[in-house]
């Protein structure tokens, strides 16, 4: 139940022998994990590895088949005020008739409790959160009229409005361009500076070392967890990634999204296009050297491209 | 108030009855439009339909136990039946791994069948006219009145009005809970606003509302009252509050218009209300500013037109570069009329000018064309280097992609290229034009 060493401050998140199943079929097996407070932690793994499920299990959104979850040493329910959640962007219907500000205000609902409406104080806070992510000019916009990166920022602002101690974020960088990614990372670093804990599902292996103090590598099981320098190794990555991703269906997706959206103003497609089709998510096929090796450090991008990349496509 | 009552009493009985019919239908429309809007937003239209059938056994049991035709016991029975159906369907989906639509279908048809059997079994005690449940009884319910404030008010107006107020209170009190649990149920649950509880509350209210709506349009057409106003309103607005108000207005127009048309043509109110609602939706779908079909077609044209413009510009750019006329000419000629139109437009936008023997790019036009040609060649390079496509496969794909690429994306692609100054055919890749 307790870890060896200092147990004075409980870990921000602690999972013990956690197994999660959908329809009795486990998708996460026997996870033991402790996330110390105040760190920025990346959750890494291929599609379908159970990263979102892991986060949902911490939040009590999916029940544990076995094992337990503690948040700051207690059950999630008693600590929910201190936890902020950024779901995967696809998890909501962006056609919903609300403005960006409305969405950010939702971050304050937990504090308000049942039936109380957000007032001037909450609005001010929500506007402040929008400003921190550089979205103040879009406050009144209906959310489907925002680009993918802007939507992601709105989600981040909503989490900021929650003013939590622990943040669980599901792919906050998915489909955003480089500028937005930098903006988001800066906000996350701010949060870390203030002593908050961040648990972030992340897909881009090339930036892992730059962003995270610790990583958790999962693929249906816990492959490894610990300080990035020790854990983010070639062998662990090989063990984590069995499959591969291709860029072609992503490019097709870009075009499809663009056409759904159909331009209203002319030349500018949604920002998500830039990111979704960017080839850096391409992973090497099994057996090829892993995409990013820790010792490469700050090597230029071209040099970091895995040699296997060209063959990873059909 | 008194004056109004006097005026009303002075009207002929037939007109009075018609007016009451309209008011009853509007009361029913109010509650259905309010809750139906949430069903539309949650993409649960089918659930509304299912509940409207599943409440039947609840109605019958409520009736049998109270022994009267009072509405309240029946509403209670309906709410319980609606919740039971929601629960069972969810249970089936979860534990029997039946897909959501299937689970709903199994449960609601069974409930409805049970209701029909109960009516037949207790036919002697249940003076519940199946026809009335199926098709509504607006015309007759206006005649069953009690006297209030010197006015003969139909009972059903009172009960439907009460349900409407109840729904209004529900939406007002749980405004933020309904909003967040409809938009992002997972976040709602993590915040302590259980999406499951909210779902049951909504389903219970829908069950009650649906029973109230039977009075107006019957169980078959209630779905029109429930879903169509919300769906119509969603086409027009992008704020929740506006959407609800619009939905209620749409419902009122359907209710009032349908009743009056039914009187005029001497046909069924339920049918006419649904027809009017359907017509409103059709009109909105055609004309709504953002999502309407007309707007979409226009936007489609705008997009096609942009492609023609861009192709005209890019072709001139290539000619300026000295690419053989034959090659440049092979680049996507559009219909002459479209090209002519595009040139006129581009000239007005100061991207083209007349020049000796034809057309020339202006500074502005050249910048736009340069970005296009740059995107085109970068993408060709990408396809050739990364996807190893043969040379003759590049052009088509790049020609399509160039219209979609932002400067940022082009830059990303460039970063990936080994050969950055020329495309695979050896043509220069121009730099990003400065804005
Ligand atoms: N609601 C559900 N019902 C049944 N199976 C599910 C459900 N949600 C997820 N799964 C399954 O559980 C596994 C893990 O899913 P999860 O969403 O956690 O993956 P992930 O690592 O977040 O993937 P991605 O990178 O694609 O987001 C997958 O095989 C998925 O098919
Ligand atoms: Mg996921």
Image: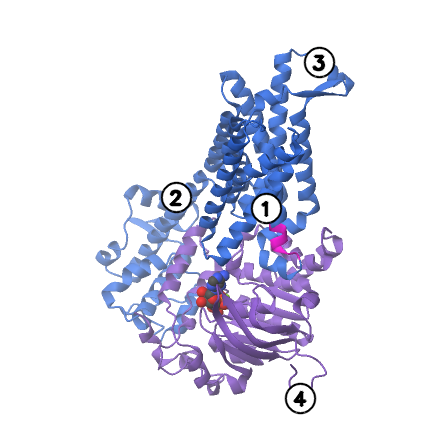
Chain colours: A purple, B blue
Residue denoted by label 1: B83
Query: Residue B119 appears at what percent x and percent y?
Result: 53, 32
Looking at the image, residue B301 lies above or below residue A58: above
Q: Measure the alpha-carbon separation of dots 2 and 3.
A: 58 Å
* Mark 2 or 3, nearer chain start: 3
Above/below status of A235 relative to B78:
below
Q: Residues within 10 Å of mark 4 (few under 14, many from 20)?
A: few
Report whether the residue tagged 1 is closer than 8 Å to ligand 1. no
Instruction: Specify which label sits upstream in the sequence, 1 or 3.
Output: 3
The residue that mark 4 highlights is A5
Q: How crowded is the residue under tag 1: few (<14 C-alpha within 10 Å), some, or many (20+)?
A: many
* Position of residue B24 in the picture relative to residue A249 (left or right): right
Q: Secondary structure at mark 4?
A: loop
Contact? badges 3 and 4 (CB < 8 Å):
no
Secondary structure of the residue carrying numbered label 2: helix
> Front-most of B179 and B341?
B179
Q: Which residues are magenta?
A: B193-199
Chain of the residue on which disc 3 is drawn? B
């Amino acid at each position: 139940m307790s870890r060896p060493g200092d147990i004075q401050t409980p870990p921000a998140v602690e999972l013990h022998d956690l197994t999660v199943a959908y329809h009795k079929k486990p998708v996460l097996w026997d996870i033991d994990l402790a996330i110390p407070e105040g760190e920025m932690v990346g959750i890494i793994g291929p599609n379908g590895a159970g990263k979102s499920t892991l986060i949902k299990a911490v939040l009590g959104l999916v029940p544990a088949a076995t094992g337990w979850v503690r948040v700051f040493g207690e059950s999630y329910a008693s600590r929910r005020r201190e936890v902020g959640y950024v779901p995967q962007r696809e998890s909501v219907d962006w056609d919903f008739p609300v403005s960006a500000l409305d969405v950010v205000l939702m971050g304050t609902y937990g504090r308000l409790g049942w039936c109380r409406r957000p007032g001037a104080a909450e609005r001010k806070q929500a506007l402040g959160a929008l400003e921190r992510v550089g979205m103040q000019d879009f406050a009144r916009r209906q959310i489907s009229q925002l680009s993918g990166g802007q939507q992601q920022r709105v989600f981040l602002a909503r989490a900021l409005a929650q003013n939590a101690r622990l943040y669980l974020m599901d792919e906050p960088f998915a489909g955003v361009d480089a500028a937005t990614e930098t903006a988001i990372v800066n906000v996350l670093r701010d949060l870390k500076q203030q002593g908050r804990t961040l648990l972030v599902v992340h897909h881009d292996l090339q930036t892992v070392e730059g962003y995270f103090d610790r990583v958790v590598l999962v693929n249906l099981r816990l492959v490894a967890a610990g300080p990035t320098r020790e854990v983010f190794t070639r062998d662990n990555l090989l063990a984590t990634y069995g499959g591969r991703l291709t860029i072609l269906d992503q490019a097709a997706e870009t075009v499809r999204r663009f056409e759904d959206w159909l331009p209203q103003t002319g030349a500018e497609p949604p920002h998500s296009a830039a990111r979704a089709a960017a080839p850096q998510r391409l992973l090497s096929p099994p057996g090829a050297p892993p995409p990013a090796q820790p010792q490469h450090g700050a090597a230029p991008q071209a040099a970091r491209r895995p040699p296997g990349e060209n063959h990873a496509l059909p | 108030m008194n004056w109004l009552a006097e005026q009303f009493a002075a009207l002929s009985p037939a007109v009075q009855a018609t007016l009451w019919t309209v008011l009853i239908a509007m009361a029913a429309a109010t509650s259905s439009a309010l809750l139906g809007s949430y069903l539309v937003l949650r993409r649960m239209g089918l659930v509304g339909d299912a509940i409207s059938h599943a409440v039947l056994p609840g109605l019958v049991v409520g009736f049998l136990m109270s022994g009267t035709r009072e509405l309240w016991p029946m509403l209670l029975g309906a709410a319980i039946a609606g919740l039971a159906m929601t629960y069972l369907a969810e249970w089936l989906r979860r534990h029997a791994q039946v897909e959501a639509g299937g689970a709903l279908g199994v449960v609601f048809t069974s409930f409805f069948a049970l209701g029909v059997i109960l009516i037949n079994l207790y036919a002697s005690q249940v003076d519940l006219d199946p026809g009335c449940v199926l098709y509504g009884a607006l015309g007759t319910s206006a005649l069953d009145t009690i006297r209030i404030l010197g006015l003969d008010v139909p009972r059903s107006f009172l009960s439907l009005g009460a349900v409407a107020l109840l729904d209004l209170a529900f939406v007002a009190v749980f405004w933020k809970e309904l909003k967040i649990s409809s938009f992002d149920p997972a976040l709602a649950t993590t915040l302590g606003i259980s999406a499951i509880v909210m779902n049951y509350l909504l389903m219970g209210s829908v069950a009650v509302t649906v029973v109230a709506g039977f009075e107006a349009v019957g169980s078959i057409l209630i779905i029109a009252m429930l879903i169509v106003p919300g769906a119509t309103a969603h086409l027009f607005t992008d704020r929740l509050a506006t959407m609800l108000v619009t939905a209620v207005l749409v419902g009122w127009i359907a209710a009032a218009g349908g009743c009056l048309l039914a009187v005029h043509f001497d046909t069924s109110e339920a049918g006419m209300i649904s027809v009017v609602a359907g017509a409103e939706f059709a009109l909105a779908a055609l004309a709504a500013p953002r999502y309407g079909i007309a707007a979409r077609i226009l936007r489609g044209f705008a997009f096609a037109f942009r492609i023609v413009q861009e192709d005209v510009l890019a072709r001139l750019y290539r000619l300026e570069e000295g690419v053989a006329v034959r090659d440049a000419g092979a680049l996507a000629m559009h219909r002459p009329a479209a090209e002519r139109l595009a040139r006129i437009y581009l000239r007005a936008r100061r991207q083209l000018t007349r020049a000796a023997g034809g057309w020339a790019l202006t500074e502005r036009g050249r910048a736009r064309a340069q970005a296009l040609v740059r995107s085109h060649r970068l993408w060709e390079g990408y396809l050739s280097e990364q996807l190893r496509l043969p040379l003759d496969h590049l052009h088509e794909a790049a020609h399509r992609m160039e219209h979609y690429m932002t400067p940022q994306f082009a830059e990303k692609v460039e970063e990936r290229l080994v050969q950055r100054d020329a495309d695979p055919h050896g043509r220069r890749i121009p730099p990003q034009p400065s804005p």
